[in-house]
Image (cartoon, coloured by chain):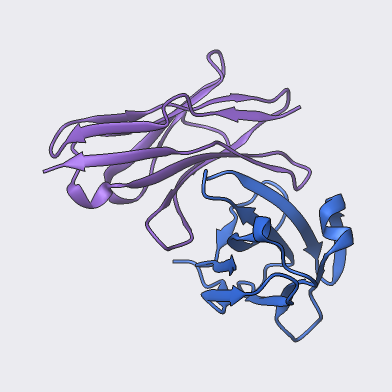
Chain colours: A purple, B blue
Amino acid sequence: AQSVTQPDARVTVSEGASLQLRCKYSYSGTPYLFWYVQYPRQGLQLLLKYYSGDPVVQGVNGFEAEFSKSNSSFHLRKASVHWSDSAVYFCVLSANTNKVVFGTGTRLQVLP
Amino acid sequence: NSKVIQTPRYLVKGQGQKAKMRCIPEKGHPVVFWYQQNKNNEFKFLINFQNQEVLQQIDMTEKRFSAECPSNSPCSLEIQSSEAGDSALYLCASTQGAGNTLYFGEGSRLIVV
């Protein structure tokens, strides 16, 4: 069975600091992995995705993520956060069967 | 930016009332999903379609929930008799197919009073 774990429900960082949001997955096949962001009262917006190839993928607004098959992880990073990055971030796994599994989200608060 | 259009953005219904939400998927996307997101940010899969055909749906959907994706018309999700526990954000998403990016609408927030 597929699963996604985001171990940190809340993360608080100061503006300008670096950020890492953790994501661990469980899937026996080749995973399609995504990070989405949800701002208040909005839907989910795609930040980046990983299918194959270079394990470090670049996304929008300076975000990147690194896929590790050995660690079953897909952590999201940003070198310098801005107050507008405050939102809820979801790690999502898509199997090749139209099944989609969501993490429980990490609420990021960026302090000015 | 996603072009999945969901209406209405907000619904307020009394218990027992019908609640209907609509979704126009992104052009060229044959697969449509409906999810229920609760206040704890948990996503519950409700149903998905490929073109007009149901691919998968959960048991809950079969009882009070109904959904369709007719050709040349918006997809819709309807709750026949709303209950307090149905209060949530209902998200529609479309994709080109398995393993491809899901594009989400802004959601329809249902409040059952």
All told, the count of numbered labels is 0
Q: Position of residue B68 (x, y in %)?
A: 81, 73
Q: From the viewer's side, name the closer residue of B102 and B106.
A: B106
Q: Nearer the viewer, residue B77 or B105?
A: B77
Image coords of residue A111 (percent x, y) = 16, 40
Left or right: B99 as drawn, with respect to A73: right
Question: Looking at the image, is B13 positioned above or below residue A61?
Answer: below
Observer-nearest residue: A109 or B87?
A: B87
Q: Residue furthest top?
A: A70
Tell me which residue sits at (32%, 28%) in the image: A20
Q: Relative to residue B54, is residue A73 drawn left or right?
A: left
Where does residue A83 sit, x and y in percent of width and height? 18, 48
Residue A31 visible somewhere in the drawing: yes
Q: Specify the quadrant of the image occupied by residue B87.
A: bottom right
Identify the residue at horizontal 64%, vertical 72% (top origin). B25
Quadrant (top left/top right/bottom left/bottom right) for the N terminus of chain B: bottom left
Image position, residue A58 (x, y; %): 37, 41
- Residue A79 is at least partly visible in this image: no
Q: Residue at x 49, y 29 (%)?
A: A6
Report which quarter residue B91 is drawn in.
Answer: bottom right
Q: Residue furthest bottom?
A: B72
Q: Is residue B37 left or right of residue A67?
A: right
Residue plotted at (52% across, 43% down): B40
As drawn, A38 above or below A2: below
